[in-house]
Image (spheres, rainbow, N blue to C red):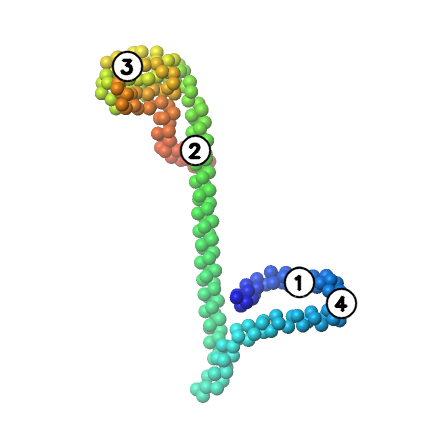
C-alpha cells in the first residue's frame, strides 16, 4: 500500500512538489499554534520526520536490493563476469519494465480515444434524432387545412385509393372531414361509401362496413409511416449541403 503511494508520487513530480511546498508553508502556523520555544519546535519537527524517513529508506533499499545482489554475485563469480555485466542485465530489466509501462500507457490512451470517439458518435446520433424530431413536428404542424386548399383534390383521392386497396370493391366506408367530403363526391358508391366525420384528422380513414378493420391513411399517419425513409433523404441532403 505504502509502496503504491510512493509510486504514484514518483510518477507525478509536480504534484509531489506542490504537496511538499504546502506542507512547508503551514509549518510556521503549526509552530505558532504549538506555543513552544522555536528550538523545541525544531527538535520535534526533526523527530517527527524520522519515522517517515525510515519507511522511505527501507523502501529505497528494498528496490535496489536485487540490483546490488546481482552485482555482488557477478563480482564473486570466477567465470570472468564483472560488475559491468550485472549493470547491463539491470539496465535490460529496466528497459523491459519501461517498455511494458509504455505499452500499458499506449493501450490506456487507445482505450480513452475509443471511448471519446464513441461518446462523440452518440452525441451526433442524439443531435440528429432531436433535429429529426423538430423537423417532423414542424411538418405535422403544417398539415391541418392542407387538403382544404385548392388543387389538393388529386392528393386526397390518392390517399383514399391507397387505403381502398386493402378492401374488396364496395365493401368499405371512407370517413373524411365534412369540408373534404365534397372532393370525393365523384367516387362511385359501388367503390366505397363516403361518410363525413369531423373527428377524422387531415386525410381519410377507410374501414370495413362491419367495422372489424380500419386503415388510417391520414396525413399524420402517412407521415409517421414514411418517417424512416424521409429521415434518410433529409440527412443525405443535410450532408450534401451543410
The answer to whether mark 2 and mark 1 are in CB contact below 8 A is: no
Q: Which of marks 2 and 4 is nearer the N terminus?
A: 4
Dot 1 falls on a residue whose secondary structure is helix
Number of the label disc, if any, that sits on residue 132: 2
- The residue beneath circle 4 is 36
Which is in the foreground here, disc 2 or disc 1? Answer: 1
Q: Is residue 5 left or right of residue 158?
A: right
Identity of the residue drawn at 71% across and 72% down: 43
Q: Earlier in the sequence, mark 2 or mark 3?
A: 2
- The residue beneath circle 3 is 193
Dot 4 falls on a residue whose secondary structure is loop
Distance from Cα at disc 2 to Cα at disc 1: 57 Å
- The residue beneath circle 1 is 23
Asked if one can make out residue 165 in the rendered structure from this viewpoint, the answer is no
The answer to whether mark 2 and mark 3 are in CB contact below 8 A is: no
**In the orientation shown, which residue stands out farthest toward the left?**
168
Distance from Cα at disc 2 to Cα at disc 3: 37 Å
Q: Is 219 rendered above or below residue 234?
A: above
Asked if one can make out residue 201 in the rendered structure from this viewpoint, the answer is yes
Q: Earlier in the sequence, mark 3 or mark 1?
A: 1
Dot 2 falls on a residue whose secondary structure is helix
Amino acid at each position: 500500500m505504502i509502496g503504491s503511494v510512493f509510486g504514484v508520487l514518483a510518477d507525478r513530480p509536480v504534484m509531489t512538489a506542490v504537496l511538499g511546498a504546502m506542507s512547508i508553508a503551514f509549518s510556521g502556523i503549526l509552530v505558532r499554534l504549538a506555543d513552544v520555544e522555536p528550538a523545541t519546535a525544531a527538535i520535534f519537527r526533526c523527530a517527527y520526520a524520522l519515522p517517515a524517513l525510515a519507511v522511505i529508506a527501507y523502501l529505497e533499499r528494498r528496490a535496489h536490493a536485487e540490483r546490488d545482489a546481482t552485482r555482488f554475485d557477478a563480482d564473486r563469480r570466477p567465470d570472468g563476469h564483472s560488475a559491468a555485466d550485472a549493470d547491463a542485465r539491470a539496465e535490460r530489466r529496466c528497459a523491459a519494465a519501461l517498455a511494458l509501462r509504455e505499452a500499458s500507457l499506449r493501450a490506456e490512451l487507445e482505450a480513452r480515444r475509443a471511448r471519446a470517439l464513441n461518446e462523440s458518435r452518440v452525441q451526433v446520433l442524439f443531435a440528429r434524432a432531436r433535429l429529426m424530431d423538430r423537423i417532423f413536428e414542424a411538418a405535422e404542424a403544417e398539415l391541418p387545412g392542407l387538403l382544404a386548399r385548392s388543387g389538393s383534390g388529386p392528393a386526397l383521392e390518392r390517399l383514399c385509393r391507397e387505403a381502398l386497396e386493402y378492401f374488396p370493391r364496395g365493401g368499405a366506408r371512407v370517413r373524411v372531414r365534412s369540408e373534404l367530403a365534397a372532393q370525393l363526391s365523384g367516387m362511385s358508391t359501388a367503390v366505397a361509401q363516403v361518410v363525413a366525420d369531423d373527428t377524422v384528422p387531415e386525410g381519410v380513414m377507410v374501414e370495413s362496413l362491419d367495422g372489424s378493420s380500419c386503415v388510417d391513411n391520414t396525413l399524420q399517419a402517412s407521415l409517421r409511416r414514411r418517417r424512416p425513409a424521409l429521415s434518410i433523404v433529409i440527412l443525405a441532403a443535410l450532408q450534401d449541403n451543410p
